[in-house]
Image: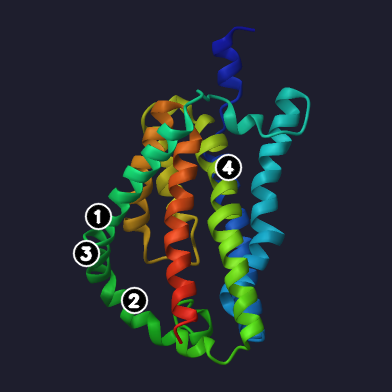
Amino acid sequence: MTANNADTEKEISLLRLLCFIFIPTSILTIIYIFIGFLQNKIPSLLLFFLLAVIILFPIEIGIVLYVSKKEYGSYSLKSSFFFHNKMSWWKIFLYGFFLFAFAGLMSVTIVPLENFLLAPISNHLAPLIPAYFDWTNMEYLKQYSNDILLLTCIGYFVLNVIVGPIVEELFFRGYLTSRIRRFGNWAPFIITVLFSLYHLWLPFNNLFRISVFLPAAFIAWKKKNIYISMTFHCMCNLFSTIGFITAVYSM
């Protein structure tokens, strides 16, 4: 078997791609909403990440492990590093820093534009969404004890800054992008759009997510190094997490 034939066999169909992405996140979102309507003993943010640990992350990393076992004979992360070039860590962090700076620029340009464009829809839907599901509603969070809020902040930091970005980058920029190489430079664009849409629980930020993650995905694709996008992803989530924790302890 030639190298080209072997690479072709590793490709996945668009249908399988969509199933891999949207079935797990749909299950998570449905269960999250269902349980959220039944209880309010813990904040919705904590509930979401507990469910992500139970449902979403195991499925995503499980696919990577299963494919690695099938292709390489052992459970590993090799299928996420199908095409990977080594790079100095200082270069990786440098790319991450500049991508993060670009994301900051997009936050003051794209975000206001997106909010303006989606205002008619979001303003109409906002009254229909219970306050429980608004992660930024600090007034609602005041009802929870300090212990619950501390647990929420710790869980949010660990899962949003470390676990989530690493798993998602291994799955999206690592495994999935390498399996649609037949689309050439469109591959990172396709995965970035699908990655944004996969955030069913955050439906009004797609334009911003695509605008900031596409450069990271494209550079990771060109440099064949997902640590670039992984570092950037962690930086972005760290920034938002610090903002949330600061807001919680400023109440």
- Using the rendered view, name the quadrant where residue 71 is placed: top right
Compute the Cα span from label 2 to label 1. 23 Å
Q: Earlier in the sequence, mark 2 or mark 3?
A: 3
- Which structural element holds mark 3? helix
- Place of residue 30 in the rendered image (x, y in percent of width and height, measured from the top left): 61, 69
Q: Are marks 2 and 3 in contact (CB under 8 Å)?
A: no
* Label 1 packing within 10 angstroms: few (<14), some (14-19), many (20+): few
Tag of residue 6: none
Q: What is the CA distance from the residue labelled 4 to the residue labelled 3?
A: 30 Å
Please indicate, yes or no, whether residue 106 appears anywhere in the rendered image: yes
Examine the rendered structure and indicate whether residue 24 appears above or below residue 131: above
In the rendered structure, find residue 171 and report the number of the disc placed on it: 4
Separation (CA) of disc 4 from disc 1: 27 Å
**Picture residue at 49% right of the left edge, 76% below the top:** 135
> Which residue corresponds to the image point at 62% horizontal and 63% vertical from the top-left?
28
Q: Quadrant of residue 119?
A: bottom left
Q: Element under label 1?
A: helix
Q: Residue 47: percent from the left, percent from the top?
A: 63, 73
Per the image, the residue denoted by label 2 is 122
Pointer 1: what residue?
105
> Which residue matches tag 3?
113
Q: Residue at x 49, y 43 (%)?
A: 230
Which amino acid, by three-letter code, is at mark 4? Phe
Q: Position of residue 129 (x, y in %)?
A: 46, 83
Q: Amino acid at mark 2?
A: Ser
